[in-house]
Amino acid sequence: MNILQIIPGSGGSFYCGNCLRDSKYVDALRKEGHQVVKIPMYLPLFSDERDITDIPVFYGAVSIYLKQMVPFLRKAPAWFDKLLNTRPVLKMAANMAGSTNAKGLEEMTVSMLLGEEGKQNEELERMVDWIAAHCKPDIIHISNALLLGLARRLRERISVPIVCSLQDEDVWVDVMKPSYRKEVWKLMKEKAVDVDAFIAVSHYYAGVMKDRMELPDRKVFPIYLGVDPGDYEFIPSSSKPRNIGYLSRLCVENGFDIVVDAFLLLKREDEFHDVKLIVTGGYTGADHRFIKKLKRRIARAGFTGSVDFHEEFEGEGRKLFFRKTAIASVPVRKGEAFGMYLPELMAAGIPIVQPALGAFPEIVRLSEGGRVYSPNTPGELASAWATLLRDRSLLKKLSLSARKGVETSFNIHVHAGEMVNVYKKLIAGRSDDASGVD
């Protein structure tokens, strides 16, 4: 099967769970013998993506932002666009303040959802023309519902089924001004008719999006995120130093300050004098002041030496982080549709301690590889950590369960197979329609 995946990139400046999720699915599909082409949008993908060097980055973040805000630039010559879409310029954009935040980008989000009627219509045609000339997909998979503006033209020109993942769109949309928020949800609902099926990353999020976008049950397929357990070195947490890990972008939304404050509370107790906090995941320019403020807070408490800001969060750097970490938390303030970091951590045998928000209770229940706590406060998180760190036997049990839970419930190869079954069903349905079969 020939599969085309359209994936927004992060530029490699921070741990992007959605980017990682899409790339891991691509790898799993290829291992099953399928041909997969990745089309990056906005920014380049992770730095270790070696197979996309000959594929343009469509909708280059700098170019489309400038054209949205400065109308006369929409008539700029081709060389100007080419310059703005070079990888060094896009990499710089990935580090700019607000580049991953919907605030201030509401008009562009609306315009993107309008598709051929939006201000990026020329770029849409460029993408569709390139795909038509270079690819012969059996199916096209769009990374998230904020890109639904692409679907109609892709459907018209390429004439294959269109699939769209559902993963944390609400996190982007719900911080917008009320008028834009209402319009974006309305547009996503309207554009959903151009898609054959939606893949929700959890049962929790399937329910959220069926409600928000008024999607019929028959079009929504919950398929969990997953990893290949063989890619992760399993080390029981009971045999590691009692370190606490955080793996995600270092920002307010992901609750990095909750982690820091919980750690400072924990360190007040002498019995945890050996415990360190290991932090990784990167950041954007918008996070600099926030991180500096927390570093000052840590210094004032006298625990600078107990916090390791582990800079490298890709490849071997992430593996080293896993070896250092016994338990981990990412206390996202509003919960999350899934959280790619969770199966990654558990595959390495690291129990997770998450707030009882979003899909987190669902993931912990299925894996039996961690604990949930409520409310999402530093005090409750510190208490949950303390319970695990005091009990080596419990830590060992949860560590083993975490790994087993990934092997049985969050295995990328199982879920890739589920995804292919959806693809085959849609392709067969399209063939039946074309032949007039009822």
Image (cartoon, rainbow, N blue to C red):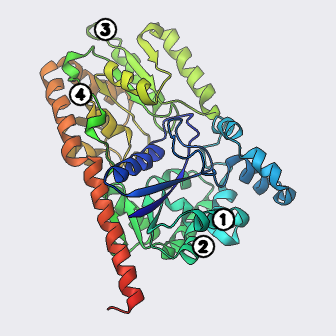
Pointer 4: what residue?
234
Type of amino acid at the residue the image marks with label 4: Phe
Q: CA distance from mark 2 to mark 1?
A: 8 Å
Q: CA distance from mark 3 to mark 1?
A: 55 Å
Pointer 3: what residue?
274
Type of amino acid at the residue the image marks with label 3: Asp
Q: Nearer the viewer, mark 3 or mark 1?
A: 1
User: What residue is shown at x 34% (from left), y 25% (from top)?
Assistant: 322
Type of amino acid at the residue the image marks with label 2: Arg
Q: Nearer the viewer, mark 3 or mark 4?
A: 4
In the rendered image, residue 388, in percent from the top left (x then y), is placed at: 21, 24
In the rendered image, residue 250, in percent from the top left (x then y), is placed at: 51, 30
Classify residue 196 by image quadrant.
bottom left
Q: CA distance from mark 4 to mark 1?
A: 44 Å
- First along the sequence among labels 4 and 2: 2
Type of amino acid at the residue the image marks with label 1: Leu
Q: Is residue 407 left or right of residue 125?
A: left
Q: Nearer the viewer, residue 83 or 262?
A: 83
Q: Is residue 401 above or below residue 395?
A: below
Pointer 1: what residue?
124
- First along the sequence among labels 4 and 1: 1
